[in-house]
Image: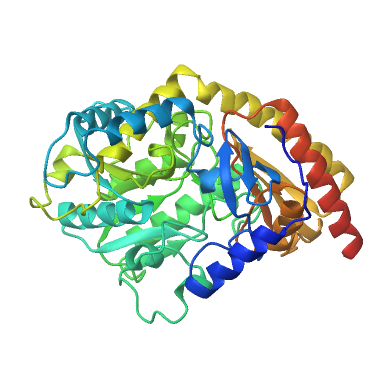
Amino acid sequence: MEAPKIVVPHPGPETRKELERLRKAESRAALSFGMSPETVVVERAQGAVIEDVDGNLFLDFVSGFGSLNAGHCHPKVVSAMQRQAEQIHQAMSLVSRTRNEFLEKVLSLHSGATPKSMILGTSGSEAAEIALKMARRATGRNEIVAFTGAFHGRTLGAVALMGRKNQREGLGTLVPGIHHVPYPYPYRNPFGDGPEKCTEGTIRYINEFLENPVSGWGDVAAVIIEPVQGNGGMIPAPIGFLKALREICDRYGVLLIIDEVMSGFCRTGKMFAYQYEDIEPDLIVMGKSISGGLPLAACVAKKEIADASNPGTESSTYAGNVMACAAGLASIEVYEEENLSERSLEMGSYFLRRLEELSERHSIVGEVRGRGLMIAAELVSDRATREPLSVAKKASDMSLKKGLLIYPGGHHGNVLAFLPPLIINKAQVDTAVGILDEVLLELDVQQ
């Protein structure tokens, strides 16, 4: 299917009808309208193309918020799900060969000589909370260091790890003992411009609070970080930062938790983004594209850490659902057989070049950045002052009407973010850039 193809101006009559039904039945707290107040009502999808109920075709550069790295309905994943559906769907507290094979395969993807074990969950939020509980049990300490702009999920413990006011409003006291430090964000960093100053300043800041007995921090169990901050605006931590963070964690006996929910499974050009550096995390949180779009997540931990938790203290009813594990096995086969890490690097480099061309034509583009196909354009009202232009949601809505799905994000709601399926081609990138050019021109005129 060639996309975009808008046969009826969006939202069409069938879309409006379904959105009306949705608004009557679903709480406004849900995520259905995360990209647009008139979102797509999906009929079917294939690869990077979505067809809505009015027959419109959309080019998908969000891919389920990063949960469909191999694209929609990859034939190999569909076939694995069909085979598994004829055998058994769900098996809590029962063992299946499919789940065993999946556990072994995911463990084999992680570097480091230390023995590891793994526990499954249903969402990135659940996996993040599993990691927090394991870290506290293993260390006997309670406090956790997280980063500004972080996103680790929407359950209560995961929300405590983020600093977003809109997510925390009305919740009162969250999980105590969480400390936030500046993310290594070279474009907006209190320690100065550039990756070197950013890394040095952030590490010095963390060291000061861990070392100083009057800093206000207590006994820290773990540091949790996204190697590329996703919802925060597709911000790659500078190369070298994770190694420096690993060293400081080792110095103070603090565990290092790497959140790969969005950045994992070839998204950044490596199977996992932390593998750009020679480090071994203590715990790794995974989700989204771990299973080709089915509800599944995981926490991999060094075995000595995992063994500090008593039997039966983690997991949940649908954790390790056999259908999801079958889809996960098939998805990983696709990632490896189709060399999607290499494709992510190739297409990501091309996409960045095209976005840089746009930045030359549109002064509201302050920075273009990314790693692999985890890419963003940050919008500003003034390049000199870097004043945020908080129109990402508006730009997403404008793009949608033109047939392109993009991800509105950023610390200030000013980042156009892109998570296309890794199977996209140059023609699809060119099409997306053409639409973005039109949207940026309209935004330019409105400023």
Establish if 141 lies above or below 112: below
Residue at horizontal 33 percent and vertical 65 percent from the top = 157
x and y percent of residue 374 in the render? 58, 40
- Please give the name of the residue rendered at 44% of the width and 37% of the height, measured from the top-left corner: 264
138 lies left or right of 30 = left
Q: Position of residue 299 (x, y in %)?
A: 28, 44
Residue at position x 43%, y 42% from top? Answer: 293
Residue 404 image position (x, y, % from top left) = 71, 46
Residue 265, position as x, y percentages in the image? 44, 33
The number of numbered badges drawn on the structure is 0
Q: Residue furthest left?
A: 311
Q: Measured along the vertical axis of the image, is residue 173 above or below residue 230?
A: below
**Closer-to-camera residue (70/234):** 70
Q: Quadrant of residue 285?
A: top left
Residue 36 shows in the view: no
Q: Is residue 20 visible?
A: yes
Colour scheme of the picture: rainbow
Q: Quadrant of the C terminus?
A: bottom right
On the rendered image, what quadrant is the N terminus found in? top right
Side of 13 where 195 appears, left or right? left
Pick out the residue farthest to the top: 337
Viewer-nearest residue: 119 or 255: 119
Q: Nearer the viewer, residue 12 or 264?
A: 12
